Amino acid sequence: MRLAVLLAASLACAGIGFAKSAALSAHVKDLETLQKIIQYLRGEIVTAASPLPDAFWETGRRMRDPYRDFLQDISEDMRRPDGKTLPAILEENTAVHLADTRLTKEEKEELQEAGCSLGTGDRAMQKANLDRYEARLMQRITELQKGLPERKRLCQSLGIMGGLFLFLILI
């Protein structure tokens, strides 16, 4: 019985390492999804000349949850005549829909800042703001991908070694 508990605890430690490794990949995937959103929004705003609520709705149609709900709820909130400002709408929907993503607090704040710049200026200015945000996203993705394989192996190795260490100590 004691051996079974030790093995289960050791395997749990290894599992934690592999889960952390998967979370690193999921973070990069979330940033790549944000990049796609920016590209679709730019197309809707600049090329299709869609109003902002329509641009968010159409972009949301192309995404999967939680990003679909995030974008489409922004669109619905923008159409309501309750007087909410775009920054308030973005802040509320980011907190509700993107809480379970791997995005950091800073990345969520940058997303909100980029979104707030959409309601101001002409289409060229909105395009320039989206281009700047996309460039920052691409830089962040590149930085994360640079060391991703090593960090994933490190997390997996530490999980396995932690499990073995726990097993040896408790024997």
Image: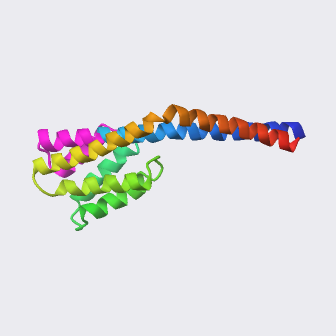
Please give the name of the residue rendered at 18% of the width and 51% of the height, measured from the top-left corner: 52
Q: Name the residue rendered at 36%, 45% in the picture.
A: 67
| Any part of residue 5 in sight | no
Can residue 127 be seen by looking at this rendering? Answer: yes
The mark tally for this picture is 0
**Residue pushed farthest bottom?**
83
Left or right position of 85 against 163: left
* Left or right of 64 in this view: 116: left
Residue appearing at x 15%, y 58% in the figure:
120
Q: Is residue 67 magenta?
A: no
Q: Position of residue 130 (x, y in %)?
A: 22, 46
Q: Quadrant of the C terminus?
A: top right
The image quarter containing residue 162 is top right
Image coordinates of residue 118 in percent, x first then y, are 20, 53
* 147 or 119: nearer the viewer: 147
Magenta segment: does it hold 60?
Answer: yes
Q: Position of residue 60 (x, y in %)?
A: 30, 43
Q: Quadrant of the N terminus?
A: top right
Segment tinted magenta in the rendering? 37-63
Left or right: 93 with respect to 27?
left
Dominant secondary structure of the magenta stretch? helix
* Relative side of 18 to 114, left or right: right
- Residue appearing at x 54%, y 33% in the figure: 150
Depth order, front residue of 76/109: 109
Q: Position of residue 66 (x, y in %)?
A: 40, 45
In the figure, 97 relative to 163: above or below?
A: below
Instruction: Say how the picture is coloured.
Output: rainbow
